[in-house]
Amino acid sequence: MQRAVLAPYGVWATVFIVVPLFFVAYYAFTDSNFAFTTDNITRFFTAKSQVSTEAGGTREVYTYLLIFWRSLKLAIISTVICLLLGYPTAYILSRASDRVQKILITLIMIPMWMNFLIRTYAWMTILQDTGIMNRMLARIGLGPVHVIGTETAVVIGMVYDYFPYMILPIYSVMAKLDMKLVEAAKDLGCNGFNVMRRVIFPLSLPGVISGITMVLIPSISTFYISQKLGNGKFYLIGDAIEGQYVANNLHFAAAIALLLMVVLLVCMALMQRYANKKAVA
């Protein structure tokens, strides 16, 4: 009976997860004639290009490793910001009354009902040099601040678009916490900080891991945010995959996607292992 119930999901997972991943791996390890090769993987680690330096000269860098590092850096910054803002938000939300929770969750979810492209264009309007933000700053005499076309603008876009994915998993875990454990910790002499550090945070760690995963993965592979809010100045790994696909270099695009997937799976496995150790401790 159990197998019969799980059969539809097994078919769905096979058709839409396993089969596409097989084709990604197949394209990654073949050339344009579909002969086996590792050149696509090697190219990712060895391709070089010339970049300008601040002194006016040029230097040689590993092209795709540099792109990957920039993508990872911005994704980690965005994830950390989402966690620092999302964790206390989720805690406050979980302790609020049922009516307030419904209102706040609706407010958090409303932006997600709008198209991703529209939300990104909205931030272009806000952050551009003649946008809403700079007009408001000009009225209070702070002058214009150039944000659009910088890494800061890209991070802002990532945080805004993926922030709900950090709050909701943490909130779902915190809402189910047994508050008797918190009361017991207070009775045993723990102050508010120790209650949070020794009781609430360890119990909410599965939600934290889920939130980090749900923000980090789309952040590191995004390309539209960097194109619009970064004015195309910051070439991220998602842009590299899209560029190779547009240029019909499907095999190299698949190789980049496969390597990115492996890195993300390793990161997820390490985070899960850390969560399991904390749970045992």
Image (cartoon, rainbow, N blue to C red):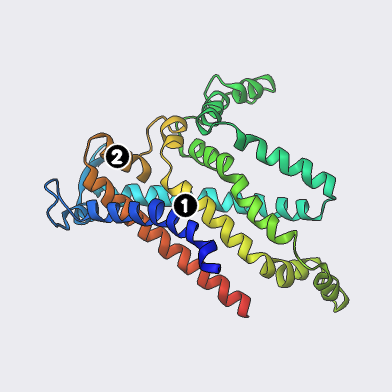
Q: Residue at x 45, y 60 (%)?
A: 10
Could you tell me if the residues under marks 1 and 2 are in contact, i.e. CB atoms within 8 Å? no
Q: Quadrant of residue 175?
A: bottom right
Q: Quadrant of residue 145?
A: top right
192 left or right of 118 in image? right
Q: Please name the amino acid that badge 2 sits on.
A: Ala
Q: Does residue 187 lie above or below 123 as drawn? A: below
Q: Secondary structure at mark 2?
A: loop
Residue 204 is situated, as x and y percent measured from the top left of the image, at 67, 64
Name which residue lies at 49% across and 57% down. Answer: 9
Disc with the residue nearer the chain's start (1 vs 2): 2
Query: In the rendered image, is residue 74 in sight?
Result: no
Classify mark 1: residues with Cα within 10 Å, few (<14), some (14-19) or many (20+).
many
Please tell me the numbered disc located at residue 202.
none
In the foreground, 19 or 80: 19
* Residue type pointed to by label 1: Ile
- The local secondary structure at tag 1 comes to helix
Q: Position of residue 142 (x, y in %)?
A: 64, 26
Q: Residues within 10 Å of mark 2 (few under 14, many from 20)?
A: few
Instruction: Name the residue that disc number 1 marks.
Output: 217
- Label number found at residue 55: 2
- Residue 191: horizontal and vertical position, in percent? 82, 70
Q: Is residue 181 left or right of residue 256?
A: right
